[in-house]
Amino acid sequence: MINGKKVLSIIPARGGSEGLPRKNILPLGGKPLIAWSIEAALGSKYIDRCIVSTDDKEIAGIAEEYGAEIPFMRPKKFATSEATADSVIKHALIKLQDLNQFYDYIVFLEPTSPLTDSLDIDSALEKLKNNRDLADSIVSVCKVEYAHPIHDTRINEKGLISPYLGKIFKSYRRQDIEELYYMEGSLYISDTSSYVEKGIFFHDKTLPYIVPRWKSFEVDSKIDLICIEAIINNPELMDE
């Protein structure tokens, strides 16, 4: 609980993965990928319950081994590549409500973002709690560094480059460029009633939780697994 409010963590993990088959249970740092998100949720001092929404019995078994609950299996219609996060979350909330179980906050953790830890979850929840007059949700963002749109180009009909922003090319000093952030997808938290109403975590009452670039890595390919494994094995280098 936080400030007397109950907190639910939902981790989505469907069995089908077209880009990297069975990625949610691939080994990373000596344990299945999904175990990282489960352990982060269970290590939070505020999360009351951690559930995994899955359609896959093997994933369900592994999730339970690491301490998550599987109060129901996800229907196949919510486990396709076209299924939205909103459909998964609302299905989970409805199933829990049918059991007369209600929560004030939702923490949505993607298993493909294994570098999110318990401290991130707790810090984000505290920031949201302390700003409830201003915001209903908080999402993780990361500073745009190497692909700032001011440096982006188009390729025109002649096969030549032209600036994406403005009409002419111009050199910019780093300190003269507006800081921008992108939603990197590792952590989403919302007041439950607000989420049910809006069906989305990010809107005009959303706070940013800024994460460093190294924490923004997510698993979409084997290369990502290699990079994240290197980060896990060299934690002392990440603060430099």
Image: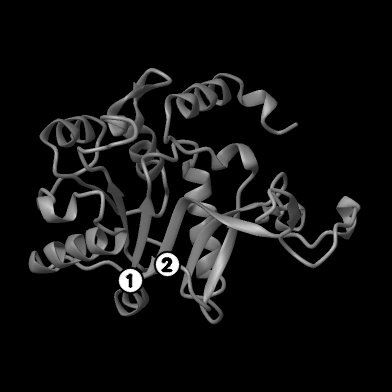
Tell me the SS state at disc 2.
Answer: loop
Which amino acid type corresponds to the residue marked 2 in the rendered image? Answer: Phe
- How far apart in space, not on screen, are marks 1 and 2 (Cα)? 10 Å
Image quarter where the N terminus lies is: bottom left
The answer to whether residue 97 is left or right of residue 157 is: left
In the rendered view, would you say 197 is above or below 226?
Answer: below
Q: Which residue is mark 1?
A: 192
Q: Which residue is located at x 85 percent, y 62 percent? A: 168
**What percent of the width, then of the height, locates residue 217?**
53, 38
> At which x and y percent is residue 80?
20, 49
64 lies left or right of 140: left
Q: Which residue is mark 2?
A: 201
The residue shown at (50%, 60%) is 139
Q: Could you say whether the residue bearing mark 1 is in a helix, strand or loop?
A: helix
> Mark 1 or mark 2: which comes first in sequence?
1
What amino acid type should be assigned to the residue bearing mark 1?
Thr
**Which one is nearer the viewer's eye here, 97 or 172?**
172
